Image (cartoon, grey):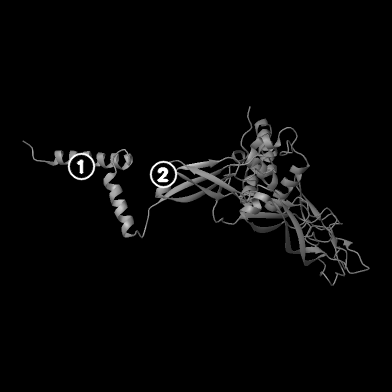
Amino acid sequence: MSKRCYYESLEVERSVDDGGLKQAFRKLAMKWHPDKNPGDSSCEVKFKEINEAYEVLKDPNKRAAYDRFGHAAFEQGNGGGGHGFGSDFAHTFSDIFEDLFGMGGGRRGGGQGRERGSDLRYNMEITLEEAFEGKNAQIRIPTSVACETCSGTGAKAGTKPKPCTTCGGAGKIRHAQGFFTLERTCPACQGRGQVIDDPCASCSGAGRVTRERMLSVNIPAGVEDGTRIRLAGEGEAGLRGGPPGDLYIFLSLAPHEFFQRDGADLHCRVPISMATAALGGEFEVPAIDGSKARVKVPGGTQTGRRFRLTSKGMPVLRSKQMGDMYVQVSVETPQNLTKKQRELLTEFEKLSSEQTQPESAGFFSRVKEFLDGLGTKGGPSD
């Protein structure tokens, strides 16, 4: 039995953003949770299905792989979504309850007072030539880094954060209500489990400060418009020594003077003279790899005809395959004619026949028959 599409499982469109994805999962998780449907085994199956779908689609890299290859991207141990109720799910569902009810410890506290830093986004525009060859780019990013004065603890030198007396360092407070035991984030320490009596003067107790960093980004050959590159651990520093977030580079391709890209294929339009189109000839066009390609035009070529140049397109990402280049010709009508040129074209028109211009001759012949038929229908009856 084939697997159901992850987007269909979560009842969302493929264009859904992160917020919409999380909202859809929240709604379905509450609906199909086994605790809300005791004794119904089908609900457990449905619950596992939406959990697996969300675990894949919430991760930008996994989602990109799924969009390109479908379920095949995670077959044979390639790291798909979680099956069942593993630790990843526990984190995910804990976050959902934290959002809904402000309870369930989540991942933030853990009694250590450290929080993971936020992910960052950097937009980068590259040329088509750079996408063809790949490049190593240097970028400057203003971001939060661990405070050197307090080594990221947030406490003044010579002091340390103290366990929160309200929650005992757990970062959570439990309340018993009937058959249920509810947890909520400790209001005194905001779930960190620690409090700082003497904050560091350099970072005001945050454990991080804003700095500008220089990073190296490797852009592989064949990247397309909208490609995302993840730099793990290069995002914002975590609070009070917490782990850093990730940095995501979003690539966009600048418009090119000659080429339009369609996947791995390139297209260009070349105007040719009426004489070249009628008599035949050849011309040179530039290729994206810096070489020149020669195109032979047979006599009688019409506007719109395409010529294919094999393997002259873009490389396929992480593959040895190459796309093709398509050259489309457009026959240019002469302008600003001299008297001699007009005389020659007039003479040529007189000598033209259905054999030399079959398309126009055939078209106007059909037009004449059509108009003659209208005249017959509209004429006086006997």
Judge left or right: residue 371 versus residue 328.
left
Residue at the far front in the pictured view: 340
The residue beneath circle 2 is: 279
Callout in the foreground (1, 2): 2
Work out whether 336 lies above or below 354: below
10 Å crowding of disc 1: few (<14), some (14-19), many (20+): few
Of residue 71 and residue 188, the one placed in the foreground of this image is: 71
- Give the total number of marks visible in the rendering: 2
Q: Quadrant of the N terminus?
A: top right
Q: Secondary structure at mark 2?
A: helix
10 Å crowding of disc 2: few (<14), some (14-19), many (20+): few
Q: Secondary structure at mark 1?
A: helix
The residue beneath circle 1 is: 371
Judge left or right: residue 301 versus residue 61.
left
**Where's residue 109, x and y in %?**
81, 55
What amino acid is found at the position of numbered circle 1 in the picture?
Leu
